[in-house]
Amino acid sequence: MLDAPLLPAVGVVAATGAALASAFMGTRAGISVAVGGLIGAANLWAITRIVRAFMPSEKEAENAKKGSAAGWGIFAVLKIAILFGGIWLLWKYHLVDPLPLVLGYGALPVGISVGTLMPRRNAA
C-alpha cells in the first residue's frame, strides 16, 4: 500500500499516461504511449516501496525485521535491470515505437510534479 502523499502522484502519472495515449487512440503510437505511461507508473510505485523500506516511519521501524533492507536493495537493483532490459526488449523486437514510449514515460515527472501540488491527507 502507498503512503497517502504518494498515492495522488501515482494516480496522476497513470492519468497523464492515459491522457497522452488517448491523443493517439487506435494507433501503434497510442499503444506505445500507453506502455510508456504504465512503465512510468509502475516505476514510481516500485521507487516508493524501496524508499519506504529504507526510510520507514517510526511506527514501521518498530515492526521492521532486521535484514529486510538488504532484500529491498536487491529489489532496487533488479528494478533497474528490469526497467532497462524491458525497454530494450520492447525496442529490439519492435513492439513499441521509441519516441511515443518516451512521451508516455514523460508522464512520470509530470505526475510527480502535479502529485506534489495536490493536498495531502494525513495517514491514520
Image (cartoon, grey):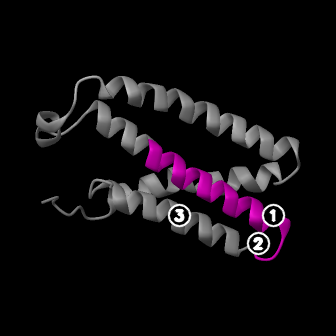
State the separation of the CA atoms marked 2 and 3. 16 Å
- Can you identify the residue that label 1 sits on? 29
Examine the rendered structure and indicate whether residue 84 appears above or below residue 115. Answer: above
Mark 2 belongs to which amino acid? Phe
Local crowd size for mark 1, using a 10 Å CA cut-off: few (<14), some (14–19), many (≥20): many
Q: Which mark is residue 76?
A: none
Name which of mark 2 and mark 1 comes first in the sequence.
2
Local crowd size for mark 2, using a 10 Å CA cut-off: few (<14), some (14–19), many (≥20): some
- Can you identify the residue that label 2 sits on? 24
Mark 1 belongs to which amino acid? Ala
On the picture, is 19 further left or further right than 113?
right
Residue lying at 47% horizontally and 32% vertically, measured from the top left: 75
Local crowd size for mark 3, using a 10 Å CA cut-off: few (<14), some (14–19), many (≥20): many
Residue lying at 61% horizontally and 51% vertically, measured from the top left: 39
| Magenta region, residue range | 24-46
Examine the rendered structure and indicate whether residue 95 appears above or below residue 31. Answer: above
Name which of mark 2 and mark 3 comes first in the sequence.
3
Residue lying at 25% horizontally and 33% vertically, measured from the top left: 55
State the separation of the CA atoms marked 1 and 3. 17 Å
Depth check: give the residue in front, 20 or 84.
84
Quarter occupied by residue 124: bottom left
Residue lying at 76% horizontally and 72% vertically, measured from the top left: 24
- Are the residues at dot 2 and dot 1 in contact (C-beta closer than 8 Å)? yes
Where is residue 28 drawn, in percent x and y? 84, 65
Q: Which mark is residue 14?
A: 3
Main secondary structure of the magenta stretch: helix
On the picture, is 121 further left or further right than 18?
left
Quarter occupied by residue 82: top right
